[in-house]
Amino acid sequence: MADSAAIEREKHMKQLKRRMECWREVILPLNSILLWERSWYPGLIFGITTVTFFLIWMLEPAILTIISVTLLILALVDYLVPVVLSLLSPVNKWTGQKEKKLNEICQNLSVTILQLQSLWKLLLKTRNDRPNVYYPGIILCLVLCIWIGSTVNNLLLFYIAVSVLLLTPGFRHKGRAMSVSIAYVCEFLFHERQS
């Protein structure tokens, strides 16, 4: 069982790496930014997110316009990046160290994708096996989302969600330092209350 899971992970990682081959020169710096390899990267992520949402808030475009502009930008990036990268970065500049880093990135991304797929399968299994738990849980979550959505501005909710999503890899990567800091602060506060 464990061997088949490892083989499945390896197969998934190799397929992912093949699909990302023309993007490898972009993936390495993007990974560096998302994992906060420099101290100012969280500020960069937060700043770009804030400026983007500030522009959306100021311009007040329609949802269809936002979706169309986003898809247009993604289509242009998907078309132009591989062409520009093939011109700017020759193949002989790709080193073994970069290849190792790309393998690590693909492996981490593959594990994350497989975990999300496993979570989805678990939800479907719960729906089929334990509907008395699944349906009340889903209804409660959706009612809570309805209440939050009607109480808080949708653009603010989306801004918070995007910011959290973009900052999560860095928090996970720097997690041990963060958890030690949080534990220290909690211990300090708890100790102060006891005194």
Image (cartoon, rainbow, N blue to C red):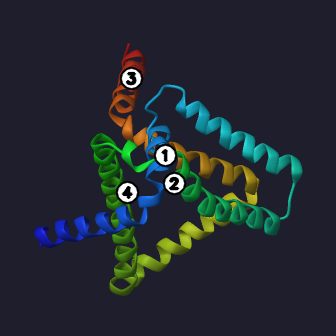
What residue is shown at x 28% (from left), y 46% (from top)? 100
Q: Position of residue 138 (x, y in %)?
A: 51, 73
Which of the two residues, 54 or 181, is positioned nearer the viewer here?
54
Q: Earlier in the sequence, mark 3 or mark 2?
A: 2
Specify the amino acid type for callout 4: Leu
Label located before the other in sequence (3 or 4): 4
Element type at mark 2: helix
Q: Amino acid at mark 3?
A: Phe
Between the C-alphas of marks 1 and 3, the distance is: 54 Å
Query: Which amino acid type is marked by label 1?
Result: Ser
Q: Amino acid at mark 2?
A: Ser
Tell whether label 4 touches label 2 (CB within 8 Å). no
Which residue corresponds to mark 2? 86
- Place of residue 7 in the rendered image (x, y in percent of width and height, measured from the top left): 18, 69
Secondary structure beneath label 1: loop
The residue that label 4 is drawn on is 109
Q: Which image quadrant for residue 4? A: bottom left
- Contact flag, marks 1 and 2 (Cβ < 8 Å): yes
> Which of pointers 1 and 3 indicates the residue nearer the eye?
1
Report the residue at 74% width, 66% height from top. Answer: 67
Can you identify the residue that label 1 sits on? Answer: 89
